[in-house]
Amino acid sequence: IVYFNHLYNVHFPPKQIINYFHTNLEKLVSTYPSGHKELAYYLSEWLNVPPEQLAIGNGASELIRIVGKNLCVSTPSFNEFESDPSVVRVPLDEETWSFNRLKFLDALEGTQSDYGVIVTPNNPTSIAVSSEDILFILNNTKKKIIVDESFGDFCDTSYLSWLSRFPNLFIMKSMGKAFGIGDRKSTRLNSSH
């Protein structure tokens, strides 16, 4: 039986990791700070980005709270983005569920929003935002733009290589989905600064 709705990998963790946890459990649960620094180092090697450009959080929810309030979000979207009453909501097109870059930019620039959040592909619609639309937003605002790529593995597109071109760009990605570790609730946030 294959379950595509699970956020974890049925083949993970391998026996070697279980043995490591068993042998080192006391150290793992009593050592502060957490292993985020080491995780950032190894992840930076894999992504080919400097570790200083990575922040690791306990899920997207934690990183969203760290980033702050005053978000402008196209909706419907990930419920954590929409949970704060101060969020500026920009509805997707009612017929096509597509992202409207002009409406989004108008809302972003016309409000007190500090960050624009673009989820691609969108959750729950599964429709990806085009590179042209993201480029248009980045070229027409100085506000910070978070591109959430948590479901990016389903469309094989990443904007990580754009970080050096756009100092206002942040890339957020859930590692639970990509690595099958949904119970770990790890999310990365990349920026060029």
Image (spheres, rainbow, N blue to C red):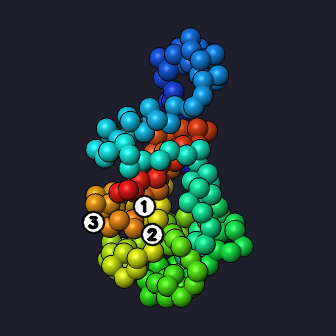
Q: Residue at x 46, y 84 (%)?
A: 105
**Residue hosting label 1:** 170
Q: Earlier in the sequence, mark 3 or mark 2?
A: 2
Which of the labelled discs sits on residue 188, or is there none? none
Residue 161, horizontal then vertical, whole percent: 28, 58
Q: Name the element at disc 3.
A: loop
Report the amino acid beneath label 3.
Arg
Residue 51, horizontal then vertical, whole percent: 37, 42
Q: Residue at x 42, y 39 (%)?
A: 40
Quick check: 127 above or below 184? below
**Residue hosting label 3:** 165
- Mark 3 packing: few (<14 Cα in 10 Å), some, or many (20+)? few
**Residue hosting label 2:** 145
Q: Residue furthest top?
A: 23
Q: Earlier in the sequence, mark 1 or mark 3?
A: 3
Q: Name the element at disc 2.
A: strand
Report the amino acid beneath label 1.
Phe
Q: Name the element at disc 1.
A: strand
Distance between mark 3 and mark 2 Cα atoms = 13 Å
Q: Residue at x 60, y 23 (%)?
A: 31
